[in-house]
Image: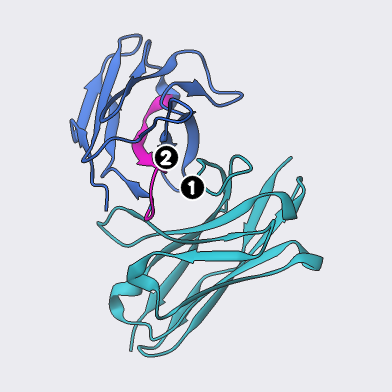
Amino acid sequence: QVQLVQSGAEVKKPGASVKVSCKASGYTFTSYTIHWVRQAPGQRLEWMGWIDLTNDNTKYAQKFQDRLTITRDTSASTAYMELSSLGSEDTAVYYCAKGGGYSTYERFDYWGQGTLVTVSS
Amino acid sequence: DIVMTQSPDSLAVSLGERATINCKSSQSVLYSSNNNNYLAWYQRKAGQPPKLLIYRASTRESGVPERFSGSGSGTDFTLTISSLQAEDVAVYYCQQYYSIPFTFGPGTKVDIK
């Protein structure tokens, strides 16, 4: 069965970076897209960006353009999300999610369990 | 950015009764070349990640009970739970994946009356 397993909770100081991993299993990793979505307390789910694993192309929401990097390790079937210059507003649960079809413009059919990132001095 | 709105914010329905949630997008999410609406519905139970229920506005995801159905086109969409069960208590979100950035509605909380 398809599973996305994320790395554990992180506590970071303002200005630091965080890197969250998302290990996929149960499907052909390189045939689909992995998206990253976050939800801050009291806020909506917020799409951050994707990595298209068929061609390694990435696309980021403009809001995160300058400080978000999404990468992958195909040999480990793992995607990574790195967010730099953290501020308190980045305290949120971060999710990876698998694209549901072969296009990048697709619903998210499987989600990771979420990783809580807390930014605090 | 496409703004998604939902109504109501919350609703309480008796077991076995119908629950209806509305979702509106600030611009059409209908892709004319394939006549598909790029609109999904997710269910999120406490402490869990979202779960896909419906995509292309009305296609039920594999394994989702038939009591869940989606309808609508263009900018106005509805999620219906035909006969509410106890396990349906959750927050429900609509999402457009028509254009970047993909955006979500604020969620509708469904409870048992």
Instruction: Give me the residue at 65% from left, 57% from top.
Output: A5
Label 1 vs 2, first from the N-terminus: 2
| Percent position of residue B61, x then y | 55, 26
**Residue A5 visible, this angle:** yes
| Percent position of residue A19, x then y | 55, 77
Depth check, front residue: B84 or B99: B99
Identify the secondary structure beneath mark 1. Answer: loop
The quarter holding residue B63 reads: top right
Residue at mark 2: B44
The 10 Å Cα crowd at callout 2, few under 14, some 14 to 19, many 20 or more, is: some
Residue at mark 1: B49
- Tell me the cyan chain: A
Q: Amino acid at mark 1?
A: Pro
Q: Which residues are magenta?
A: B88-101
Q: Are marks 1 and 2 in contact (CB under 8 Å)?
A: yes
Q: Amino acid at mark 2?
A: Arg
Identify the secondary structure beneath mark 2. Answer: strand
| Percent position of residue A1, x then y | 74, 40
Do tags 1 and 2 sit on the same chain? yes
Looking at the image, residue A117 sits to the left or right of residue B65; the answer is left
CA–CA distance in space, label 1 to label 2: 6 Å
- Tell me the blue chain: B
Tell whether position A6 is magenta.
no
Q: Is residue A104 above or below residue A89?
A: above
Q: Is residue B56 above or below residue A68?
A: above
Q: Is residue A11 above or below residue B22?
A: below
